[in-house]
Amino acid sequence: MSVLEFIIEVAGTYVATLAFGILIPRRALNVGGWIGVLGYVLYRFTVLWGGGYVIGNLLGAVAIGVASLQAAKLKKMPMILFNIPAIVPLVPGGQAYQMIKNFALGNNSTALVFLLQVVMISGAIAFGFLLSELVNRIQRRFWRHRKRL
C-alpha cells in the first residue's frame, strides 16, 4: 500500500464517520470523526503487521472507547455521541454482505466462513469496548490515587 492510498483511506474514513454521525451535535462531529480515524488507523496497522482482522478490530475498539471518554470529558457531552459514529469503519459490513450473498446463491460452506468472520469481528468490537471501560476505570483510579498523594 502506498502513502497516497493510505491518505485516501484515512480521508474516506473521516468522511464516512462524519456522514454517519450527522445527527449528533455539530460540536461533537469533528472530534468523533478523528476518533473514528484513530480506531481505523490502529485497526489497519494491526492488520498490515500481521495481527489479523479480529485483533485489529479489538484494538481499534479499545482506542475508540478510551478516546471517546476523553472527548466526552473535554466536550462535556455523553460518550455515546463519539462511540457510535467512530465505530462505523470497523463494522464488518463487507463480510456480512458476502455471507448473505453466498447463502442466497446456495454456497453454504462459504457463507458459514463469512458468518464466522462476522461473529468474531463483532465480538472483538464488543469486547474492545468492554476492555476500554476497564482501561478507563483503571485510569480514573490512578488519577484519584495520584491526587491524594
Image (cartoon, rainbow, N blue to C red):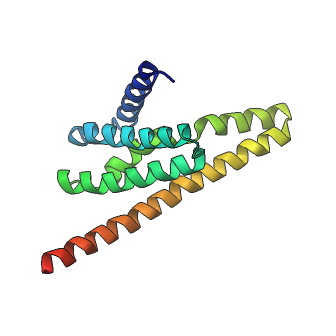
Res 111 visible: yes
- Left-right relation of 61 to 78: right
Q: Does 22 appear above or below 12?
A: below
Q: Position of residue 115 (x, y in %)?
A: 72, 46
Question: Residue furthest toward the bottom?
Answer: 148
Residue pictured at 47% horizontal, 51% vertical: 59
- Left-right relation of 92 to 148: right
Name the one closer to the observer, 134 or 97: 134
Question: Residue furthest toward the top?
Answer: 4
Name the one closer to the observer, 108 or 51: 51
Q: Does 46 appear above or below 101?
A: below
- Left-right relation of 86 to 26: right
Q: Where is residue 32 in the image (x, y as percent from the top left)?
A: 31, 42
Q: Where is residue 42 in the image (x, y as percent from the top left)?
A: 44, 43
Q: Where is residue 22 in the image (x, y as percent from the top left)?
A: 33, 35
Residue pictured at 43% horizontal, 55% vertical: 62
